Image (tube, grey):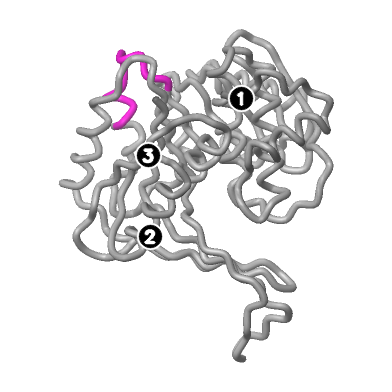
Amino acid sequence: MIYTVTFNPSLDYIVNVEDFTLGAVNRTTKELVYPGGKGINVSLVLKNLGVENTALGFLAGFTGIEIERALQEWGCFTDFIRIPEGMSRINLKLKSQEESEINGQGPKISEQCLQKLYQKLDGLLPGDVLVLAGSIPNSMPDSSYEDILARMEGKQIRAVVDATGSLLVNVLKYHPFLIKPNNHELEEIFHMPMDSKETIVAYARKLQEMGAENVLVSMAGDGAILVSADGQVFGSKAPKGNVINSVGAGDSMVAGFLTGYLNRQDYEEAFHLGIAAGSASAFSERLATREEAEGILRQMGWDTAGKMA
């Protein structure tokens, strides 16, 4: 089973305003509401690609109820911890002449609630996959990712970590199966410009020397590079398409990679499906569907046979 953890889930309220004017009454021309958060995005795309998974994390208030209801409606399994006070956040994403976001704070997560999550994670079995994605709320210890992976050590749990800066670097000693920095995050970690494929590959290998098994580097419109655990390097330009919404594209890439890898343990297949799922989400108002990802695979001339569960 694949488990995703989202510490601070959200309801994403996405609105289009034709000509937004600050200080005036503005009316929307289009609205969308769906559950958000990096781990939740991974869960949704995995399910769309035919892979069963369970979403874990913390929920509170009426917004938490709606987040869980929507996930279950999409077919995801859920096992959230209820926080008795506060409410899960609402993130406003405004699309007009420019895109703007206002992200909510979310509920305070107590030590007692955090221990409940740890207890759930202690029940994972050998061969399970654990996805840790996103930032850590300020009410939780900065070491929370490290603490989780320390508990998983030696249990044959494959960890996937999609985080930035020190959150990512500090977990490499636990040998995560997959990390997915983007090229800008690589620059922040190593204080070096990532201005060529050769440079990106070299510093991805440094992350492997620090403990990571597979390093998948996303580069937005420039595509992606994978340096795999067996030493192979795969690179691809981004598929052609109209980018509608970049939110969730990286999470979709993680879901696509996992789907492809778990199907036949083939890194090239996993890489291709990761790019296809990430691009399909970027080209859509919502997250990638199986049909959309398969369409990208065909567009790029990649075989779709046997790619998905």
Q: Residue at x 26, y 65 (%)?
A: 86
Extent of the magenta region: 148-158
Q: Mark 1 sits on what residue?
A: 308
Nearer to me, 104 or 77? 77
Tag shown at residue 77: 3
Tag shown at residue 246: none
Q: Is residue 87 left or right of residue 159?
A: left
Q: Earlier in the sequence, mark 3 or mark 2?
A: 2
- Under circle 1, the secondary element is loop
Res 165 visible: no
Going by the numbered disc 3, the residue's amino acid type is Phe
Q: Is residue 17 left or right of residue 142?
A: right
Q: Residue at x 67, y 24 (%)?
A: 271
Q: Mark 2 sits on what residue?
A: 66
> Label 3: few (<14), some or many (≥20) within 10 Å?
some
Q: Quadrant of the C terminus?
A: top right
Residue 150 magenta: yes
Q: Residue at x 64, y 16 (%)?
A: 267
- Residue 130 location, x and y as percent? 40, 28
Q: What is the C-alpha distance between the residues marked 2 and 1?
A: 29 Å
